[in-house]
């Protein structure tokens, strides 16, 4: 038997390429120069990949318009929310096509976003997905191609925006799940896939399908690179997990010096610092602890995979409870008190394939009703508990994380972030981007943030600061030569505010675009001690001016000269 060839079409492809190359040489001989690019394109197509996601690429009008129109942000000052005057930090709501918003975010947040959560159109064919201002229906033979073209442009930018240890979560249903997975494999790489989580969106099926009554959706997660650390598991075992100080414990025991178990009982002796356990259970004792009659003589400080915050643990302990580890595979206390004992349940690992005890769409509707006087302004919203689960899970030690949602819809992500901050004292900030179709940005997304901040009869206020930006455009041909640069400088302020999460109307934050402005501030005592000046990189400062800034302890933050560089270079 001859040697088996598992690539029977390899020679066929090689012969075809060889033939086309001969046609190119003949075209050169015959001086048919116009045929050469077309033949070279044929070779390129013959050499294109044969495995992966392939679709008919579609152009998008909003992207084409950016060749002649430069998107900029303009603040709607009437919609500024200052619910938290004790903080100088701001969150942002960006109104406009999210491709324009993402384009501008590349100037301010490249490699800076910690968590991206999006709930894009599911492309069901039921007027949920618009492409070039027209709904894509079930009869459209290019429905998947249009959706993939639409998503690819946005997900490529999303990858650029993610921090090195960042992660993206994408909600989806059966219609595009498998296409989405292949698309994310191409953009992020197969090795960056984290999981496809299954979320039970409702408790009772609707039976609209006539085939299968589906009650679940999916959240597909990808990391930027290998530095990602998730609650419930780590990709890098050398990274520390959440610190928890447990004080006033009644007992500890060491079993075979291979695992540290805190349980009801007595232990006398010295617990040596070090790492105990193997497999799922790894606990680090941070210092030696002498135990007498089951009572540590100093605070027991450990690192482990804990769910609950220190305050909640301490409250249970002070009430007579003991941390009792029921399973050696987890350190996840649920604080179910029974005769003073804090019992431990098996974990719901974030790196698992399902979510338990996460709110449903019904809960999400109730949340909106509590904010909107008993009427939900949107169908099928996502519950804040779902987004909380993922936001808290990613880099959960980083309580100053930046979270982006560029299909913001009803604004659930904003509410989730603010509620998490209220629960654990974090300083996470969110950026929401949405269009204003049917006034959703103004009447739903913004209105929800306003009500979250102020509170309602059925919702306790969670004060927040927010700035509202709308997309506008500068037509290139209207500003020839250097006048375009001067015009674009008029729109630098929103980008500065966005990048540094500040409000420029704060007297301790000022923008200086030229020497005359700086000179005026100095000559008229317009500078404030311990403030920040955002200064254009071309502004020259002499020694005397630098001394004034130094004496007032003013921080000079250079405005990035790349804010509108690409638009100027490509003119």
Image (spheres, rainbow, N blue to C red):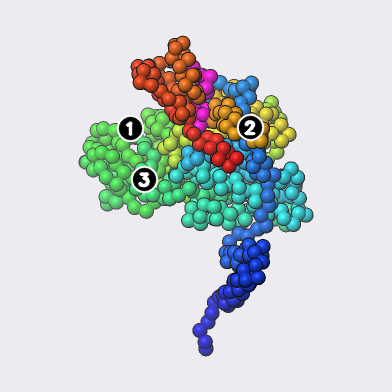
38 with respect to 265 (left or right) = right
| The image quarter in which residue 446 lies | top right
Q: Is the residue under label 2 in contact with that under label 1 (CB below 8 Å)?
A: no
Per the rendered image, the range of residues in magenta is 496-510
Query: Which residue: 71% across, 31% down?
Result: 439
* 375 sits to left or right of 72: right
Q: Residue furthest top?
A: 524
Q: Is residue 66 above or below residue 557?
A: below
Residue 450 shows up from this direction: no
When the figure is inspected, residue 541 is found, relative to residue 301, above or below; the finding is: above
Instruction: Give the number of the disc on residue 37.
Output: none
How many neighbours does mark 1 have within 10 angstroms: few (below 14), some (14-19), or many (20 or more)? some
Residue 73 covered by magenta stretch: no
Q: Which residue is mark 1?
A: 247
Q: Which mark is residue 479?
A: 2
* Image position, residue 73 (x, y; %): 60, 31
Q: Which residue is at 69% across, 34% downward?
A: 436
Of residues 256 and 387, which is closer to you in this image?
A: 387
Q: Residue at the location (73% across, 53% down)?
A: 209
Say the numbered circle drawn on residue 239: 3
Judging depth in this view, the residue of 336 and 284 nearest the camera is: 284
Q: Which x, y percent locates residue 193? A: 50, 53
Q: Secondary structure at mark 1?
A: loop
In-front residue for pair 109/300: 109
In the displayed structure, 518 sits above or below 379; it is: above
Q: Residues within 10 Å of mark 3 (few under 14, many from 20)?
A: few
Cα separation, mark 1 vs mark 3, equals 24 Å
| Lower position in the chain sequence, tag 2 or tag 3 | 3
Per the image, label 3 sits on a secondary structure element best described as loop
């Amino acid at each position: 038997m001859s040697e088996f060839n598992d690539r029977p079409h390899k020679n066929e492809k090689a012969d075809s390429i060889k033939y086309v190359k001969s046609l190119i040489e003949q075209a050169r001989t015959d001086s048919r120069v116009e045929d050469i690019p077309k033949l070279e394109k044929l070779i390129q197509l013959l050499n294109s990949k044969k495995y992966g996601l392939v679709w008919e690429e579609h152009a998008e009008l909003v992207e084409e318009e950016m060749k002649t129109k430069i998107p900029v942000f303009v603040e709607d000052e009437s919609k500024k929310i200052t619910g938290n005057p004790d903080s100088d930090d701001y969150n942002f709501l960006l109104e406009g096509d999210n491709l324009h918003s993402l384009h501008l975010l590349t100037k301010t947040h490249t490699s800076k976003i910690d968590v991206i959560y999006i709930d894009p159109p599911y492309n069901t064919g039921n007027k949920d997905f618009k492409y070039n201002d027209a709904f894509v229906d079930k009869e459209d033979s290019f429905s998947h191609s249009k959706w993939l073209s639409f998503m690819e442009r946005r997900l490529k930018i999303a990858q650029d925006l993610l921090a090195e240890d960042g992660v993206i979560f994408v909600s989806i249903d059966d219609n595009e799940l498998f296409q989405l997975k292949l698309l994310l494999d191409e953009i992020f790489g197969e090795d960056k896939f984290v999981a496809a989580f299954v979320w039970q969106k409702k408790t009772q099926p609707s039976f609209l399908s006539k085939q299968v009554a589906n009650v679940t959706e999916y959240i597909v997660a990808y990391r930027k690179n290998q530095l990602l650390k998730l609650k419930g598991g780590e990709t890098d075992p050398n990274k520390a997990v959440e610190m928890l100080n447990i004080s006033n414990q009644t007992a500890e025991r060491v079993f075979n010096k291979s695992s540290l178990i805190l349980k009801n009982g007595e232990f006398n002796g010295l617990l040596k610092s070090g790492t105990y356990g193997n497999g799922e259970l790894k606990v680090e004792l941070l210092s030696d602890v002498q135990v007498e009659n089951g009572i540590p003589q100093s605070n027991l400080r450990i690192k482990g995979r804990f769910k609950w915050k220190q305050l909640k643990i301490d409250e249970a302990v002070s009430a007579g409870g003991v941390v009792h580890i029921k399973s050696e595979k987890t350190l996840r206390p649920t604080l179910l008190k029974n005769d003073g004992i804090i019992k431990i349940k098996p974990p719901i690992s974030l790196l698992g394939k399902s979510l338990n005890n996460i709110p449903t769409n019904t809960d999400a509707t109730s949340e909106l009703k509590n904010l909107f006087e008993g009427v939900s302004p949107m169908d099928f919203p996502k519950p804040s508990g779902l987004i909380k689960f993922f936001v808290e899970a990613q880099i959960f030690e980083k309580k100053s994380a930046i979270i982006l949602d560029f299909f913001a819809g009803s604004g659930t992500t904003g509410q989730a972030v603010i509620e998490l901050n209220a629960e654990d004292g974090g300083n996470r900030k969110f950026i929401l981007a949405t269009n204003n179709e049917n006034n959703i940005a103004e009447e739903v997304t913004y209105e929800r943030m306003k009500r979250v901040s102020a509170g309602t009869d059925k919702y306790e206020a969670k004060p927040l600061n927010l700035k509202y930006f709308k997309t506008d455009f500068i037509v290139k041909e209207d500003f020839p030569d250097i006048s375009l640069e001067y015009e674009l400088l008029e729109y630098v302020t929103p980008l500065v505010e966005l990048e540094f999460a500040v409000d420029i109307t704060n007297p301790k934050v000022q923008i200086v675009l030229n020497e005359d402005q700086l000179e005026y501030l100095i000559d008229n005592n317009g500078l404030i001690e311990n403030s920040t000046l955002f200064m254009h990189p071309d502004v020259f400062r002499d020694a005397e001016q630098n001394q004034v800034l130094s004496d007032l302890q003013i921080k000079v933050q250079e405005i990035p000269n790349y804010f509108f560089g690409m638009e100027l270079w490509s003119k």
